[in-house]
């Protein structure tokens, strides 16, 4: 019961913060709400007993991605105070479409799907060791190939952001 | 114990919020933030499935880690792109970036 | 605690590794060497060596890397197509790179990285690997699209491509998550065995995956970005991604549908058929009224994605091998068409207007004839490569009791002949209004060489289709 209350609180916090991200007219505030959303998601990970992922979430999303976004906002500083409308003209229709999508997904998850009465088994002791083993064992290939992806991002970010030398 | 479907509902709602933002915001950085919300929503799904269906098999967690890596790489490239455009155009509003029409 | 490192043999990944090493070498050499022309040739050499590795792997038994990657005949066929595309694209980019760009090393390296992503997509037998490969390919292409920094449109195209691509990735991932939830597996064979008849969640997962996939290979109605991106990107990049990304995307999804979803063809077959009809019709109708050659080619590439999808929707072995053959034929003719566009484009404009094609044949008869061959092949005129591609995929549709789909395809081909012929007619039109104005054309030798290669293969594949079809059939055998 306590868990459920905690879950509802964390979820509501996450969703409200996420809604503020997409609806707040000022970009900088949106970014701050985004940080809060990331933290809320990390909270959900803790509830799911995925401790390592929760730490990764805080370090990468809250730590790195948010900082990157805030940097970008500040570098394109013309945007920060500007009060032109932040949403495009189709926003109303998009809202309608989103509402429909939400109803569809909820109907699908709550009514149509017969979930097996899952009693989540206990998380095995040493799950983090298992995860580490898997990353350099069964999943070593995507793990290695992901490093190519990071290299691409590295080269690409430099190419794009470099001032032209003319 | 919290039912699995609760997590899936939260994930679905978060995904839809991101969906709305990605299609309705005008600023490229705001769109990117909305897409990050969508990716986060998917990761909740992965971890919920891992926790409830296959807690001894780490596949869901591994995919979540890979997805986070990809999201970070995408953010880096995307923001570099935004800055490059801002330098040449003085705007990152998607409406105003519209030389290509046909 | 002891960590047991798995003993994996990276041999099946050898062609990709060769390209990766080449890309790193290019980046290194770029910093110490003054003459940038050698970078392109170094990369070209890399694709050749990688091709030799593909050939060598094809001689031995099928190798597999855990349940992640395989080097079966199918993967090697895709490797071949993608390597050809990469090699020709390097040659197409050569002169533009030397004259108009100051970041040749990065361009070449990113093109090689994208190629690695494409090859990995063909070899991936696990949703995780497919996803990572798709992202390598996409990220490299976003960056390459923004490479023509002298034009504002290039950066704009890159931004659009990036935002829509990342949006599509989110859908792809959501689909992967639902599939994982309904089967408990991420490798294609495991998904296939545990999905059973499907179930609602699996269906939703496949639908979401399909949305992500449709964005990447530009299927209607998720193709909106294509014309803008192809028009804004450097023309050599448009050429590269119009064929390479399509080949890789179709490769991964053909394998996905045939391996993981073989049991539920009755559900996805008709859906894909409908998508094919929508895609080719939409692409062709939009192409009819384009005034920019690059936009025309973009809509034409959407239509061709529709034709190729017919092979996937047919779901039989002729469909699979026909699709593979189509990817190969399409690679040569589309690279050729974009190559001619590179020749015709005015420096700095990055595009060719249809009106400026007028009278090309009088001053450059060979060039006009070459373009005519590519256009005829794209339209599906026998006996060129494009004709047999269409013949095989439409034949597969008939074989799968979807004759209506083949008929729609033929009607669409007739429709497309109109705009392909329009390009040709404009080039051969006697030009009275424009007077004696010189049609500006640069004919650098490397570009000419690339065009000759593409032309040669469009004709050869058309004259002897059975050789290539046999290879495609060999590759499609893995689906049993």
Image: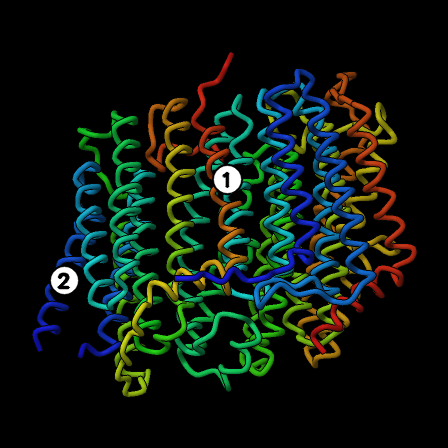
Q: Write the residue at 72% across / 72% down.
A: C478
Q: Which mark is residue A151?
A: 1
Residue A104 visible? The answer is no
Could you tell me residue C437's position as x and y percent? 75, 16
Label 1: chain letter: A
How would you rate the neighbour count of disc 2 (Cα within 10 Å): few for under 14, some for 14-19, many for 20 or more?
Answer: some
Most extreme residue toward the front is C1
Most extreme residue toward the right is C463
Q: Write the residue at 59% across / 24% down.
A: C349
The part of the image, by quadrant, that contains residue C292 is top right
Residue at the spot of label 2: A10
Contact (Cβ within 8 Å) of mark 2 with mark 1: no
The part of the image, by quadrant, that contains residue B52 is bottom left
Badge 2 marks a residue whose secondary structure is helix
Answer left or right for C55 relative to C309. Answer: right
Q: Write the residue at 43% across / 66% down.
A: C175
Label 2: chain letter: A
Answer left or right for C102 relative to B91. Answer: right
**Which label sits in the foreground, 2 or 1?**
1
Could you tell me residue C295's position as x and y percent? 60, 40
Q: How is the image coloured?
A: rainbow
* A129 w.r.t. A80: above or below: below
How would you rate the neighbour count of disc 1 (Cα within 10 Å): few for under 14, some for 14-19, many for 20 or more?
Answer: some
Q: Earlier in the sequence, mark 2 or mark 1?
A: 2
**Could you tell me how many numbered marks the image carries?**
2
Which part of the image, by quadrant, shows the C terminus of chain C? bottom right
* C353 w.r.t. A106: above or below: above
* C127 w.r.t. B20: above or below: below
The part of the image, by quadrant, that contains residue A30 is top left
Answer left or right for C285 relative to A90. Answer: right
């Amino acid at each position: 019961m306590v868990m459920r209350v905690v879950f509802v609180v964390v979820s509501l916090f996450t969703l409200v913060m996420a809604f503020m991200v997409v609806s707040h007219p000022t970009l900088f505030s949106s970014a701050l709400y985004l940080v809060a959303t990331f933290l809320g998601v990390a909270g959900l990970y803790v509830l799911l007993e995925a401790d390592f992922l929760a730490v990764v979430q805080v370090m990468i999303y809250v730590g790195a991605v948010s900082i990157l976004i805030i940097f970008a906002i500040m570098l394109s500083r013309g945007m920060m105070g500007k009060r032109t409308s932040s949403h495009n003209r189709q926003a109303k229709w998009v809202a309608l479409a989103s509402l429909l999508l939400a109803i569809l997904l909820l109907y699908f998850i709550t009514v149509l799907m017969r979930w097996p009465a899952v009693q989540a088994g206990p998380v095995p002791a040493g799950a983090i060791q298992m995860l580490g083993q898997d990353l350099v064992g069964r999943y070593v290939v995507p793990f290695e190939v992901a490093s190519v992806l990071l290299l691409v991002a590295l080269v690409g970010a430099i190419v794009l952001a470099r001032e032209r030398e003319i | 114990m919290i039912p699995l479907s609760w997590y899936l509902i939260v994930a679905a709602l978060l995904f839809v919020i991101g969906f709305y933002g990605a299609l309705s915001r005008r600023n490229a950085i705001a769109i990117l933030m909305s897409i990050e919300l969508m990716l986060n929503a998917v990761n909740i799904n992965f971890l919920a499935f891992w926790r409830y269906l296959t807690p001894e098999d780490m596949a869901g967690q591994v995919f979540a880690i890979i997805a986070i890596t990809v999201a970070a790489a995408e953010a880096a490239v995307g923001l570099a792109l935004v800055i490059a455009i801002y330098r040449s155009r003085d705007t990152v509003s998607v409406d105003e970036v519209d030389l290509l029409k046909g | 605690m002891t960590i047991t490192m798995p003993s994996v043999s990276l041999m099946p990944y050898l062609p990709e590794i060769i390209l990766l090493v080449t890309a790193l070498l290019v980046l290194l050499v770029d910093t110490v060497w003054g003459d940038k022309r050698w970078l392109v040739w170094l990369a070209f050499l890399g694709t050749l060596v990688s091709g030799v590795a593909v050939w060598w792997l094809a001689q031995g038994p099928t190798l597999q890397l855990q349940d992640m990657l395989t080097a079966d005949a199918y993967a090697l066929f895709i490797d071949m197509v993608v390597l050809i595309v990469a090699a020709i694209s390097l040659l197409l980019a050569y002169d533009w790179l030397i004259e108009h760009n100051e970041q040749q090393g990065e361009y070449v390296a990113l093109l090689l990285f994208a190629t690695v992503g494409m090859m990995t997509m063909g070899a991936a037998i696990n949703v995780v690997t497919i996803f990572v490969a798709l992202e390598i390919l996409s990220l490299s292409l976003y960056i390459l699209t923004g490479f023509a920094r002298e034009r504002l449109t290039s950066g704009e195209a890159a931004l659009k491509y990036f935002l829509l691509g990342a949006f599509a990735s989110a859908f792809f991932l959501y689909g992967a998550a639902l599939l994982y939830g309904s089967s408990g597996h991420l490798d294609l064979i495991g998904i296939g065995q545990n999905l059973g008849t499907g179930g609602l969640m699996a269906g939703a997962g496949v639908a979401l995956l399909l949305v992500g996939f449709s964005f990447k290979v530009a299927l209607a109605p998720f193709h909106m970005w294509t014309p803008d991106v192809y028009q804004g990107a450097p023309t050599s990049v448009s050429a590269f991604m119009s064929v390479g990304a399509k080949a890789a995307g179709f490769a991964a999804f053909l394998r996905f549908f045939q391996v993981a979803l073989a049991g539920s063809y009755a559900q996805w077959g008709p859906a894909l058929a409908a998508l094919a009809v929508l895609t080719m019709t939409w692409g062709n109708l939009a192409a009819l009224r384009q005034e920019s050659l690059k936009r025309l080619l973009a809509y034409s590439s959407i239509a061709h994605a529709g034709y190729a999808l017919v092979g996937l929707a047919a779901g039989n072995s002729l469909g699979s091998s026909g699709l593979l053959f189509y990817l190969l034929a399409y690679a040569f003719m589309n690279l050729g068409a974009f190559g001619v566009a590179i020749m015709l484009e005015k420096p700095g404009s990055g595009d060719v207007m249809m009106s400026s094609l007028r009278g090309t044949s009088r001053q450059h008869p060979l060039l006009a004839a070459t373009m005519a061959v590519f256009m005829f092949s794209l339209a599906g005129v026998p006996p060129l490569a494009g004709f047999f591609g269409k013949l095989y995929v439409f034949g597969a549709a008939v074989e799968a009791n979807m004759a209506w789909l083949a008929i729609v395809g033929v009607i669409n081909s007739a429709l497309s002949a109109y705009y392909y012929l329009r390009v040709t007619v404009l080039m051969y039109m006697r030009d009275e209004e424009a007077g004696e104005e010189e049609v500006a054309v640069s004919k650098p030798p490397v570009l000419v060489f690339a065009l000759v290669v593409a032309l040669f293969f469009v004709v050869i594949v058309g004259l002897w289709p059975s050789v290539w079809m046999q290879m495609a059939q060999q590759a499609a055998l893995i689906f049993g």
